[in-house]
């Protein structure tokens, strides 16, 4: 199948490549030419704009940073809606605000375009391996139609969560758990270090117990090594927690832990660490503890 793919960053690049490995033909666009060149070298065809992608493809995937980027790419000048024919399917795999998914879906529906929101979890390593966890909102028939041949070529699981925006609500819940878990690891390992116990030994001792987690296994070694190469950037996590806090306020669900971690991430951003991996929360604790 000929698939349009817009947004070829840390995640989009390997996801696009996995679709090509599965035998799909890709037409791609990104505002950063180097990202386009990388995927073209792997066999994709490039297009001059999101509109040009939509003119050539009846199935389009977007993998962009946040709600405003998806709105621009879909609803803006030279965007998907200017080029797409009625009946086109749009799979937005970006992590954005659930309300934005609903707004974009409305604009799509007015032109006969069918949209699902399908954000992912797993980070760059799972994007490369094609083992992402995918959470989906929107029309269930559309989901079932793309599940095997498209979604499961990029992911190990694809779970239908409900109507449009439900994928992104699920993703926000995921991001709350991940943020609080990384902050808890940073807090605990700083405590151990400050009290004179080698963090590497603490990791070895506790990773197999109840405190152990996927987050601990992935992020604590980065904290110990002082390696904060992203991965998932501090600024992207600020974006997700902002969307979670707004959603929480909207539905009347207080998020006190999320609010506290948001303050830590904002401090890191102000310190010039916004492009570092979110394991950089260790640097927040290093600063406040003087370690
Ligand atoms: P990224 O910043 O590396 O990539 C985003 C890409 O979108 C960039 O290549 C950028 O040039 C492109 N872009 C921005 N505006 C554009 C426009 N108007 N037209 C065309 N292209 C445009 O981000 P990423 O890490 O790949 O993340 C993408 C999405 O996936 C985000 O919503 C993020 O929260 C989510 N996500 C990321 C990870 C991770 O570990 N990196 C994990 C799960 C989910």
Image (cartoon, grey):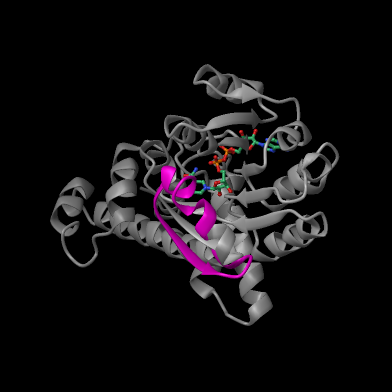
The spot of residue 180 in percent (x, y) is 43, 63
Question: For the magenta stretch, what is the residue range?
Answer: 144-167
The residue nearer to you, when weighing 251 against 220, is: 251
The spot of residue 179 in percent (x, y) is 45, 59
Q: Residue at x 61, y 68 (%)?
A: 245
Q: Magenta stretch containing residue 149, yes or no?
A: yes
Q: Is residue 8 visible?
A: yes
User: Horizontal placement of 137 versus 173: left or right?
Assistant: right
Q: Is residue 263 visible?
A: no
The spot of residue 211 in percent (x, y) is 24, 64
Q: Magenta stretch containing residue 75, yes or no?
A: no
Report the quarter where the N terminus lies.
top right
Give the mark count: 0
Vertical order, 63 against 116 (above or below): above
Quadrant containing ligand 1 reads top right
Identify the image quadrant of residue 242.
bottom right
The spot of residue 101 in percent (x, y) is 68, 60
Vertical order, 287 against 33 (above or below): below
Q: Residue at x 36, y 46 (%)?
A: 131
Vertical order, 172 against 71 (above or below): below
Outermost residue toward the bottom? 252
The residue nearer to you, when weighing 58 against 37, is: 58
Q: Residue at x 58, y 57 (%)?
A: 240
Q: Residue at x 76, y 31 (%)?
A: 52
User: Horizontal placement of 232 versus 88: left or right?
Assistant: left
Outermost residue toward the right? 77
């Amino acid at each position: 199948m000929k698939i349009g793919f817009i947004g070829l960053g840390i995640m989009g690049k390997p996801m696009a490549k996995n679709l090509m490995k599965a035998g799909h033909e890709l037409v791609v666009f990104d505002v950063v030419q180097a990202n386009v060149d990388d995927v073209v070298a792997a066999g994709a065809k490039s297009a001059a704009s999101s509109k040009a992608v939509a003119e050539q493809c009846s199935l389009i995937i977007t993998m962009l940073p946040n709600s405003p980027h998806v709105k621009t790419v879909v609803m803006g000048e030279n965007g998907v809606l200017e080029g797409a024919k009625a009946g086109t399917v749009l799979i937005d795999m970006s992590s954005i605000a659930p309300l934005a998914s609903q707004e974009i879906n409305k604009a799509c529906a007015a032109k006969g375009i069918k949209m699902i929101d399908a954000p992912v979890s797993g980070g760059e390593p799972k994007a490369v391996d094609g083992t992402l966890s995918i959470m989906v909102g929107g029309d269930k028939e559309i989901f079932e139609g793309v599940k095997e041949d498209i979604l499961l070529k990029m992911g190990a699981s694809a779970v239908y969560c409900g109507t449009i925006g439900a994928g992104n609500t699920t993703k926000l819940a995921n991001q709350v758990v991940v943020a609080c878990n990384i902050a808890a690891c940073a807090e605990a390992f700083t405590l151990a270090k400050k009290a004179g116990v080698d963090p590497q030994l603490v990791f070895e001792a506790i990773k197999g117990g109840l405190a152990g987690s996927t987050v601990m296994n992935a992020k604590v070694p980065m904290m110990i090594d002082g390696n904060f190469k992203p991965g998932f950037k501090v600024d992207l996590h600020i974006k997700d927690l902002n969307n979670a806090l707004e959603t929480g306020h909207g539905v009347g669900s207080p998020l006190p832990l999320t609010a506290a971690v948001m303050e830590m991430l904002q401090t890191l951003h102000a310190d010039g660490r916004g492009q570092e991996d979110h394991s950089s929360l260790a640097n927040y604790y290093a600063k406040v503890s003087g370690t």
